[in-house]
Amino acid sequence: MNPWQSTRVALRALRVNKLRSMLTMLGIIIGVGAVITMVGVGGGAQARVAEQIQSLGSNLIIVLSGSTTSGGIRLGQGSQLTITEEDANAIAREVSSVQASAPSMRGTAQVVYGNLNWATGIQGVTADYSEVREWPVAAGRFVTSEDVDGATKVALLGQTTAQNLFGDSDPLGQVIRIKKVPFTVIGMLDRKGQNSWGQDQDDVVLIPLSTAKKKVLGVSQANARAVGAISVKVRPGEDMAEAEAQIRALLRQRHRLQPYQDDDFTLRNLSEILQTQEESSKVMTYLLAAIASVSLLVGGIGIMNIMLVSVTERTREIGLRMAVGARGRDILMQFLVEAVTLSLIGGVIGIVLGLGGSRAISQFAEWRTQVPPQAVAMAFGFAAAVGVFFGFYPARKAAQLDPIEALRYE
């Protein structure tokens, strides 16, 4: 008997017991569907982390004013402004792996337009800030070096701030007031979304750094050139850890810190932080898939049990087929095809249900899901492997039956 004939006989046997066949496939259906759904949820989490990395800017290092010690008391990060605009210039000039650096100052204020107002973050920036943070403008223009040198009263609005102040109308050219100081809106920033700690990056107003110091946020009494942070963009392909070490060494030298003294600044490698989150989400995806795979194992055991029952029920049929010339490998092929067919049909139905479940989670739970094609192929292949593995023992048992004993079986 050729494989095609064995397949026809196996499919006919499955059609005779439709309910039993459907119940046998149920474990495979649930297992494959659960694996695809869980992989989709994990893939969505990884995609979200990747978006956060991109929204912050690639190869980004943030320099913040760090802890200082005064009278034995360690002051918190940012409590004293210890980094300056000159530090930012030195980093861009003397660290070869750095593409650009941008000093900035940040505060909060009430922004007023007409009879509307909105409390938002005010950030003083330089012309390099757009390049460092990879934050283009959706309309208008960005702050220029001339704006910083002249301390002009111009502003760029984040999408959230613009929506709350202007709604659907065009803000370009309009005048807003920040702490009673009039600013002309020269641009709209492109949408950034939330960062890794849930902060809305679009709820912001960008103004020239010099204007922020002189007219909005104020300056440090100790050093008028001090800034709150320096954003540093490392060139693509450069070692981030090496760049971080060079920046630390340069700043320690500039701040005249002795070897036994702590840094008076803090370096944050945001790419490393978010890549760690990405690795964590990958581990969670693998864990969810492994848990869901238990359902496939249970489904395979169900197939083996049903096939063993089927062999027992059809012992006389097996004996009769052997008596008329069927060989052991023909019987083996027939039962193996039955097991694999059950697994494959269950796998196809499970794939459909898994994709549908992922879409339902995305739509109703507002959780992004992403099912890679290789996950679907892997689930389908695993379903076929389950059919072969768990169907082989019952098929082998049927093939080894003695024809005479099988014909006598009641």
Image (spheres, rainbow, N blue to C red):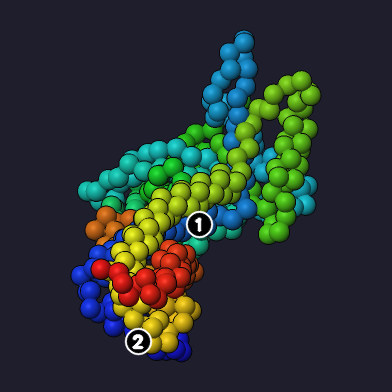
Q: Nearer the viewer, residue 309 or 30?
A: 309
- Labels 1, 2: front one: 2
Q: Position of residue 347 (x, y in %)?
A: 36, 70
Give the vertical position of 89 relative to 360 (above or below): above
Give the vertical position of 222 relative to 213 (above or below): above
Q: Is residue 234 left or right of residue 139?
A: right
Type of amino acid at the residue the image marks with label 2:
Arg
- Which residue shows up at 30% across the image and 45% down it? 118
- Which residue shows up at 36% across the image and 55% down it? 298
Residue most toward the top? 71
Type of amino acid at the residue the image marks with label 1:
Ala
Residue at label 2?
8
User: Which numbered marker is on residue 141?
Assistant: none
Q: Where is residue 392 in the image (x, y as percent from the top left)?
A: 46, 67
Q: Earlier in the sequence, mark 1 or mark 2?
A: 2
Quarter of the figure that contains the C terminus: bottom left
The answer to whether any part of residue 208 appears in the image is no
- Which residue shows up at 71% across the image and 59% down it? 237
Q: How crowded is mark 2: few (under 14 residues within 10 Å), some or many (20 or more)?
A: some
Quarter of the figure that contains the N terminus: bottom left
Residue at label 1?
50
Q: Nearer the viewer, residue 201 or 169?
A: 201
Q: Position of residue 295 (x, y in %)?
A: 36, 55
The secondary structure type at the circle numbered 1 is helix
Give the vertical position of 352 relative to 197 (above or below): below
Q: In this view, does 23 lie to the left or right of 370?
A: left
